[in-house]
Image (cartoon, rainbow, N blue to C red):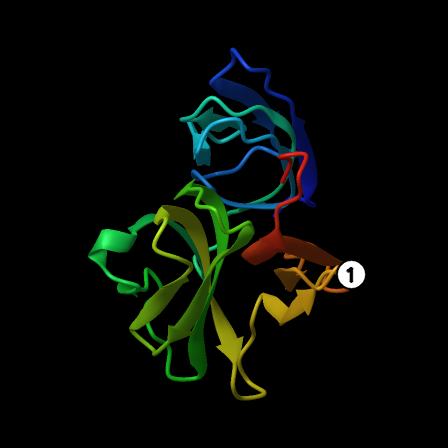
Amino acid sequence: MTVLDIVHNQMNSSQNVYSQIITFQQRYSQQPSILLGFNHLDLSYNTPNISYEVIVSDISLTSANITVQRFDQNTIYGLYIFYIVIQDSEIQVQYFKLLLSDGQKQIKQFKLVPKAEAQNQVQCLLTGINIKFSNDYNKYFGIQVTNTQTDYTIEIQGEANLTYLTVNCLEYYKQITTNSYSKIADEQFLLSNDSYTTQLQAQINNQYTDTQLTNFVGITQLKTTLTSDNVL
């Protein structure tokens, strides 16, 4: 695992795609997984639709490409992206596009094989959205996740104007007995200071030194009142 890093993207009104190559701190022996999360979004909405996705692609042993794809004509001023690079058979990342037309509760299968001494766990983070604006300036969208040993249910939370959400999901084993070991030391949900945003904080044991811990933060739910200056 690398330590977390931040990408700050700026897109003007004529730029629909912004890409940045990230170089890993080490060369991996196999293609790693990348978990994305963002904790800051600054955009104007001069059209009745917000639609964008943060995508990871072209993952090699040494680098990957992170792309912000915009599908509307709104301006993205700032988007702070966290990422963590993982090569570990006991930690997996999956990427999903959740169409509201497929239902608010959608079941996904674990990549991780169940273990007798551990509980399969999963947390999912928002990486994109497609939502139309109504006259109501109160906006609420996000996800909640519950799981069994073999699958997990992602429940979409939002209004009828929400078309889809894109998410990536971190799958891991949670320790049950003292003889088992989990790379994830702790996870919790935190409210930001303005009480609008629910974030996931995962404390991850570094696989190289047992004493080093990495905090990873990403948004799972967003509840906000849009202001008169048309900036979210």
Residue 34 sits above or below residue 74 on the image: below
Q: What kind of residue is marked 1?
A: Asn
Residue 34 sits above or below residue 60 on the image: below
Answer with the quarter of the image where residue 206 lies: bottom right
**In terms of depth relative to the viewer, which is nearer, 174 or 218?**
218
The location of residue 177, given as percent across then percent down, is 53, 88
**In terms of depth relative to the viewer, which is nearer, 84 or 41?**
41
Residue at (78%, 61%) from the top-left corner? 193
**In terms of depth relative to the viewer, which is nearer, 14 or 144?**
14
Q: Secondary structure at mark 1?
A: loop
Residue at (69%, 39%) from the top-left corner? 5
- Relative horizontal placement of residue 99, taking residue 36 as reference (left or right): left
- Relative horizontal placement of residue 15, taking residue 185 as reference (left or right): left
Residue at (53%, 53%) from the top-left corner? 139
The location of residue 172, given as percent across then percent down, is 47, 66
Dot 1 alpha-carbon crowd within 10 angstroms: few under 14, some 14 to 19, many 20 or more: few
Answer with the quarter of the image where residue 49 lies: top left
Residue that lies at the very extreme toward the front in this rendered image: 135
The location of residue 83, given as percent across then percent down, is 60, 42
- Relative horizontal placement of residue 47, taking residue 228 as reference (left or right): left
Q: Which residue is mark 1?
A: 193
Residue at (47%, 71%) from the top-left corner? 173
- Relative horizontal placement of residue 38, taking residue 125 as reference (left or right): right
Answer with the quarter of the image where residue 217 lies: bottom right
Residue that lies at the very extreme toward the bottom in this rendered image: 177
The location of residue 54, given as percent across then percent down, is 48, 35
Q: Quadrant of the C terminus?
A: top right
